[in-house]
Amino acid sequence: MLLQPKSLKYKKYKKGKLSNYSRKSKKLKFGNIGLKASESGILTARQLESARQAINRKINRKGKLWIRVYPSLPVTSKPSESRMGKGKGSISHWVVKVRAGQFIFEMCGITDNLATLAFKSGKSKLPFKTNICY
């Protein structure tokens, strides 16, 4: 099941701009090892779920994993070969804007070697560069 919000104030939002600067916390809050974005980018709910599944497979569901980002921004698209005009289009998927320095996942309860191995497999599912931080 993909992550998406239950309700929104407005159905459709403007895209906005993605800044490199992050006002989010650059320290671990929950776990003792984390996966940190080293560059800004847009992360879809499918990519986030795929990375989470890859990490959980490696740790055999022994440790505790926190997801620090949530896809709450809708992305719309119009059907192909439709004429211009007639509105914005329906919601196709959900994304989250991740800034450089923001933690995506945090983990605790397992050894550092196993956590590093798990984050390496999850890191390959993400569309931007990430670092493993202790």
Image (cartoon, helix red, strand yellow):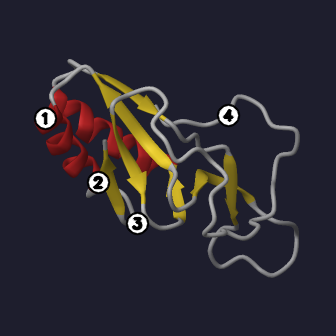
Instruction: Note whether 63 is above or below 67 in the view shown.
Output: above
First in sequence: mark 2 vs mark 4:
4
Q: Nearer the viewer, mark 4 or mark 1?
A: 1
Residue matched to label 2? 123
Nearer the camera: disc 2 or disc 4:
2
* Three-letter amino acid code of the residue under disc 2: Lys
Q: Quadrant of residue 7?
A: top right
Q: Residues within 10 Å of mark 2 (few under 14, many from 20)?
A: many
In the drawing, what numbered circle is on residue 68?
none
What's the residue at 66%, 69% (across, down)? 19
Q: Is residue 71 above or below residue 125?
A: above
Q: Which residue is mark 1?
A: 114
Question: Distance between the Cα atoms at labels 2 and 1?
Answer: 14 Å
Instruction: First in sequence, mark 2 or 1: give its number.
Output: 1
Mark 1 falls on what kind of element? helix
Q: Residue 132 location, x and y as percent?
A: 29, 50
| Location of mark 3 (residue) | 128
In the rendered structure, are the residues bearing label 2 and label 1 in contact, judged by CB atoms less than 8 Å apart? no
